[in-house]
Image: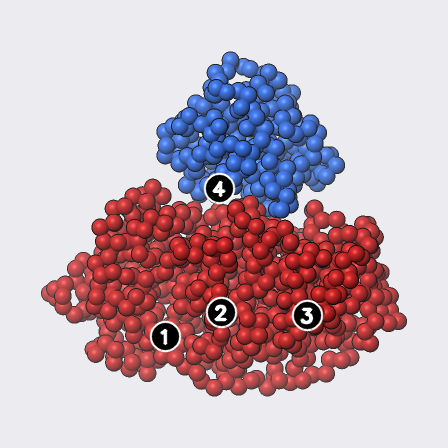
Chain colours: A blue, B red
Amino acid sequence: MRIAVITLPGSNCDQDCHRSVEAAGATAVPVWHREMSLGGADAVIVPGGFAHGDYLRPGAIARFSPIMTPVVEFARSGGLVVGICNGFQILCEAGLLPGALLRNRSLRFQSHDCALRVERSDTPFTSRYREGQVIWMPLAHADGNYYADPGTLEELECEGRVVFRYSDAEGESTEEANPNGSLNGIAGIVNEGGNVLGLMPHPDRAIDLALGWQDGLPLFESLVDSVRQRAPAPVAVAEGRALAGTAR
Amino acid sequence: MSGANGAPRPRPGDPPITPELVEDHGLSPSEYELILDVMGREPTFTELGIFSAMWSEHCGYKNSKRLLRLLPTTAPWVIQGPGENAGVIDIGGGWALAFKMESHNHPSAVEPYQGAATGVGGILRDVFTMGARPVATLNSLHFGDLEMARARYLLEGVVRGVGDYGNCVGIPSMGGEVHFDRGYEENPIVNAMCLGIVRSDELIRGEAEGVGNTVMAVGARTGRDGIHGATFASEELSEGDDEASRPQVQVGDPYTEKLLLEASLELIASGDIVGIQDMGAAGLTSSGAEMAGRSGTGVEMDVARVPVRAEAMTPYEILLSESQERMLVVARAGREEAARRVLEKWELEAATIGQVTDKGTFRVLEDGVPVAEIPALPLTEGCPAYERPGEESKEVRALRAQDISRYGDLSGDDLQAAFLEVVGTPAVASKQWIYEQYDTTVRASSIERPGGSAGLIRIPGTDLGVAASTDCNGRHCYLDPRSGAAGAVVEAARNVACTGATPLAITNCLNFGSPLRADIRHQFREAVLGIRDACAHLETPVTGGNVSFYNETDGKAVYPTPVIGMVGTIADVAKFVGHSFRRPGDAILLLGHNKGELGGSEYLYTLHGVVAGGPPTVDLEAERALTRCLPAMAERRVLSSAHDVATGGLAATLAECCLGRPRTGRPVGASVRLDDALPPAALLFGEDHGRVIVSASPTDEAEVREIAAKHGVPCAPIGTVGEERSSLQIHLRGEFLELPLGTLADRYFGAIPRAMDDEP
């Protein structure tokens, strides 16, 4: 199984994602942003960093990188795509995920551990978690303040597309536990088809207990499980497929 | 018209060389005489500019290099000592560690954000030009008191600058230190350190080898920013300099830096190039001349081929520009195209500007017309070295002799209040507000992040860990530069050893006032001797460093601040020891013994506004034993925690051991009994060296004491770790303090946020 890890100029978590994929038992394939093809990869990760320097605003230039054309096609045809941190911002800019990541409420870069409540364990990315489970991982961003218009927000909540929510250690989604001002404490969401995930915290930095946390590894393992069960990928997906119907 | 082979002649519009012009270039009449000797003729304006940069204090080390030769620089594990872009040591498993520290004090004083950002950029380039991938940064920051608006402005800007740059490039911050004292009111100290790793057989040096090889300018275009930055950094600031100096401060672009980093490592791995050098201080001049000087060849370049971003730049400006994110690359003859393809992949501009020659000169043309030709070796090595005698200031001698014993007696509520005040002073308090603006987890290798004793990272794919710490107590150094500097070395070593790592080598950044002053020369000499003694004893050689003089404004110098960056290794990161108490019921033990030395302490400064007394004494034999004993204990896995005693004394250390980390830590109480016959304040707040607080489970306590005894380290049980949500209780002779964890946490974690974020 081959999972493409996109490297854009300015990506700086590509190596971390590479190791995470390998730790989950798959082969990570580095793909440079000027490529026009994903080379038959079974899933795609858009890693964190400062693609194109985050100039203009995070993800705004990256969405025009040549590789984003096949990534968007892959996602639209139901392929599994994960965007972490800057990757999440890029997927929003590319129109694969709704909403936007605004500047943190503190107006500063923030780098610290955070607790997340797993809202859905029936997505291709979270099957190895339990619903309601509290997981810990680092976050590191200046623009992680999730925003969407009220209609979109309601849609996300009603369709259960909020996958990770900032919480305290007990799993309560409180105002103090919200690090950056994200609406409804949203840390990660999936698209309508349930095959594209974006999240701000870093599961790729939480795959090894020696470093404090291992709670990110199940995300990569879930991804690998899902790809394995879906093979041959990418599967053509019927339009408007609901999240609950996603193959597991 | 002079042809390409003729001698350089003045360009139209060049000012005539007058004694005033020479003086404006920071060169003394005797230095100019020496230049005439080297050249055998009058230099052109362009050549004068080149000499001015290369013979500046910043590049030429003219007031320091004689003394620096006294430092120990060798050990079997040292691969590269001083003189290269970075020092390198062997850390086992086929890996080498490249590391270096540098100052960006002057630009940060004028423009804190860009000053600090470009400081990080420069130190990263020093490491990756050795072929090493940067894996962590540290810093050492010294500001005035946070009550002053200027200190808050500088802290805010410097922290954002350090953060934005390192975060974007994707290098985790692993630690550092931040001090506050009015001695740094006008002139902050901003030192950045970088660690990089490389396979030992893939090291590369900044040399221009091979006659006929191609010299390329790579990266950002050359502009008019930072012209004469090196000379600027070699003068003192004066009132009103902020505006006038701004064009000498460079602007950083971390995105281009990231591309340069990846491209450089790819180029080095490809074998298409023989050398690579940062265009740092004095830009194209120093990188070209140093590459030629080191390899004993020569370099010829044509400035008309250097990509520029401003109109009508003169050779003088192009040669002395300090525009950031530029590199000089020497490609193997015949492999330029391959090198160019790598650079194009990373979207970097590359221009062939010249070649390596066998003439032994640094030769510059402008569109084929010679504008400068200087023998390379005299230019890089010929800068005269001075060792003028120094003399200690009487004022400092008097301060040191001052009797401070009366400050040791404090009791009851006053003692309790003093405890909270010391724990809540910004110099002691948690630096969470600062380090949470730095990415500390990128690269997924951070074992111990900022906030502990030292930082610790793991080498990917191995169990090997590298620990590092930066330390310097400027107040101690002010009162006694020799023992203060030795103290910085031993404190850094203790911090590294507390994690379980063995200290191996240092880099340093020597920040001082003007060397034209006798008292500063005295400070500098004494500090170098202190570092020499301590490094020799601990067997931690000096692999490189940086000297920053002229840190003064209108005659008021900063405290002498010789910052030490210590590195060490631990074979198995699973044996890492954290700094805070972990298990209720664990025994608390003191390694070393209490002396109650209050001189130069944070307590005296904060509560009494006094900077006086002799700073804590340094017993090098005891420190050596202690820093060997700690890794032995870690190896046996008998420690639950280990934390150094330094600024704020036992009070600060005990509070930190109880509180642990913010957010995820679980504060635990402790009950401690200290029977020493010392005045209470001296016992709690004295910053005596040679002490570490450890905790161990009751079953491991005996072995801890055994290992200590074997190393000749005093080890006494002083208490027990308590429960969560309780208090820190301290019994002294005739005194009892009870400090609820909630109150301690508020003081310790709240101090800097309150100073920085609360409405005035």
For marks 3 and 2, give the CA distance: 22 Å
The amino acid pointed to by label 1 is Gly
User: Taking A59 as reference, is B316 above or below it?
Assistant: below
Q: Which residue is drawn at the image coordinates 29% and 80% (left, top)?
A: B34
The residue at the point 82 percent across, 69 percent down is B674
- Residue at mark 2 to residue at mark 4: CA–CA distance: 34 Å
Dot label at residue B75:
2
The answer for how far apart the CA atoms under marks 3 and 1 are is 53 Å
The subunit carrying tag 1 is B
- Contact between marks 2 and 4 (CB within 8 A): the answer is no
Q: Mark 4 points at which residue?
A: A15
The answer to whether the residue labelled 3 contacts the one labelled 2, judged by CB atoms less than 8 Å apart, is: no
Give the structural element (helix, strand or loop) at label 4.
helix
Amino acid on which disc 2 is placed: Ala
**Where, by quadrant of the figure, is residue B452 drawn?**
bottom right
Nearer-the-camera pick, B534 or B200: B200
Q: Is the residue at mark 3 from the same chain as the one at mark 2?
A: yes
- For the residues labelled 4 and 1, the Cα–Cα distance comes to 47 Å
Please tell me the numbered disc located at residue B26. 1
Q: Are the residues flagged by discs 2 and 4 from a single subunit?
A: no
Q: Where is residue A168 in the image (x, y as percent from the top left)?
A: 71, 38
Which residue corresponds to mark 3? B711
